[in-house]
Amino acid sequence: MIALAVCAICLSGAGLVAAGIPHGSRPLKISLGLALGLGTWSAAYAAQWIAFGARGTGWKDAALGVFGVGLLLFARRRAGTAAQGSGVRRAVLATGGSERPKTADGEAAETAGAEGAQAVGGEAAEPAGRWLAVLFAVACVVCAAAFVEHTWRLPDGGWDAWMTWNLRARFLVRAADARDAFSPGMLYWAHQEYPWLLPGVVAQVFLLFGESYTAPALVAFAFAGLLVGTVVSFVAQLEGRKVALLAGLVLCSTPCFPSFAANQQSDIPLAVYFFAAAALLELGRGRFQTLVLAGFAAGLCTWTKNEGTIFVGCLGFGLFVFRREALVPFGLGALPGFALLVAFKLLVAPPSPLTEPGLLGRLVDPQRWLVLLADVARRLVYFQAFGLWLLAWIAALVVARKQLRRSPLALALFLSYAACAGIYLGVPYPLHWIFKSSADRLFMQLWPSAILLTLPALRRATART
Amino acid sequence: MLSLVGVLRIAWFHFVSEPLHEPRRPHIDARFAKLRVLLPAQGEIGYLSDDPPTARPTDDPSPPGTQLYEEAQFALAPLILRNGDDTRPVVVAQVRDADHLDGLAREHGLRIAVTAGPHLAILRR
């Protein structure tokens, strides 16, 4: 069963990546493939339970394995057809250091327009500064050690981990009727209405290896590693190794990153999938299947946390405004994850506390606006969580504002933050308490995508001055 | 430079400040281990406390009573703890002040069936 589960994760991830980004670098394929494979594994577990009431992993894992092999064969056949149809020109591209075929139809898409072409052909060939690589390695080691320290100190993870995510995993494994996991009989602080990608992974690890305190910690570590891996490998593909190391360094030197990773909560998985969706959109200019894969990652976002749906909606709006041609493939890819979320919300989940009466009154309450503005202002200089990165990011946005004007991701991030503000105002909870306990995590969910947005734009802005 | 500041902040917090000021927390399950074996494996049970959890979303959930309830729910899953419900055949009582246990049971017309430490008990009618 364990081998079957490993095959299901690896093959489905490899198949998705092969179909979506056939010419991606190997590190990118590995990190993104594992992230998507893990998410698909969890989503399929939820889907089989909602559809058939089944909670075993065997048949589902076998089906996922077959699905992965099918996608791999499809990708191979497609690559062969493209090579025969348009003739193959060989070009050595420095990104990933491998020789990759460039077909007539793939060329424009792969290099992602003029900027992408410049990045892949130019910056990618530039050797990364040795000092940057050393600093990145040191940051990774410090982060990993901090993760271990935090896990040792808080062995059940952060508050939300045991109150919501691992509680759900326990129910899924222990309860005779898995619907108990979403029972309105518990107090709503258990957030029974939340989607459950992370609990789905942890529950299956429990089923395969038996319940332990190690399993959720290892899953959390895996997601943190995958986040670093996807950020570095994606930015390397888009902008070259030097910018990629810088992006990884920014992420790993953000003070709240190792703490949130060790907290065993859904924020880091959400960051992984939202980043993957945003980066695949960048990579997939003009390439239909890459845009579908971006949508698929966005679908996993929606299945990770409620905020994920908002972020994906904002990303969709950004595409609608600036890249309308990408909207259809993106929407097609997002469909499975979104359908799963809708099925869960309609068939299983209890109502959200957002449906508590008085929403309009809270939204226009000047007292709540004042509290929110004061809390936001205080958070901008919250050194403990962000170091100096938040201020630096705002400065970078000002410098690179011209480069960001027509960016769907820039608009999506702006709208996401605005939507979060609206949610803070609208939720029935005491505002100062909910802001203090969640604002840093919201920041971390979007931070990797903010790095993806800002670093390349900043590089171009400073190169032109 | 910014990265260096960030890395130093991580190192300071996790390897100096936290070890000095934040003691290691024990597993939540450890506190409920004795109680758990005395309870049914599945279903719904009542939950009472001298410091009840916040029951409405509009109330501040930071008082300790909410945490006590949530910890009990986590440790005793897949049992569903129905807060304030004294009509169930089995009711778990968790008190912050051990002296309140008898009074809590009496107040709800229940008797203490089993205690599992000074702060935890199973109440029955």
Image: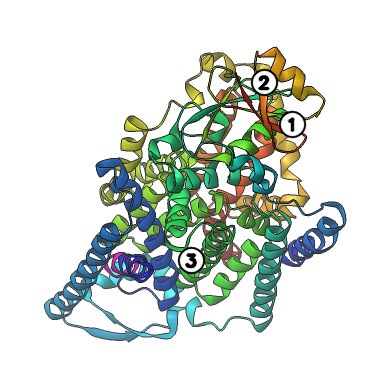
Q: Tag 1: Cα neighbours inside 10 Å, few (<14), some, or many (≥20)?
A: some
Q: Tag 2: Cα neighbours inside 10 Å, few (<14), some, or many (≥20)?
A: some
Chain letter for the residue marked with disc 1 in the picture: B
- Say which element carries label 3: helix
Q: Are marks 2 and 3 in contact (CB under 8 Å)?
A: no
Q: Which residues are magenta?
A: A13-20
Instruction: Determine which of the numbered discs, if any, sits on residue A168 in the image.
Output: none
Identify the amino acid type marked 2. Arg
Identify the amino acid type marked 1. Pro
In the image shown, does A113 or A81 lie closer to the viewer? A81
Drawn side of residue A78 relative to residue B96, left or right: left
Residue A216 appears in the figure: yes
Task: Provide residue A324's location: percent of width, then percent of height.
Answer: 30, 46
In the image shown, does A136 or A325 lie closer to the viewer? A136
The nearer-to-camera label among 3 and 1 is: 1
- Say which element carries label 2: strand
Q: Quadrant of residue B56?
A: top right
* Residue drawn at point x = 42 percent, y = 62 percent: A208
| Residues marked 3 and 1, same chain | no
Task: Provide residue A314's location: percent of width, then percent of height.
Answer: 43, 41
Q: CA distance from mark 2 to mark 3?
A: 58 Å
Instruction: Determine which of the numbered discs, if any, sits on residue A230 in the image.
Output: 3
Instruction: Name the chief secondary structure element in magenta.
Output: helix
Q: Which residue, given by chain and number where applicable, does mark 2 sit on?
A: B111
Image quarter of the N terminus of chain A: bottom left
Q: Tag 3: Cα neighbours inside 10 Å, few (<14), some, or many (≥20)?
A: many
* Residue drawn at point x = 46 percent, y = 32 percent: B43
Which numbered disc, 2 or 1, marks the residue that appears first in the sequence? Answer: 1
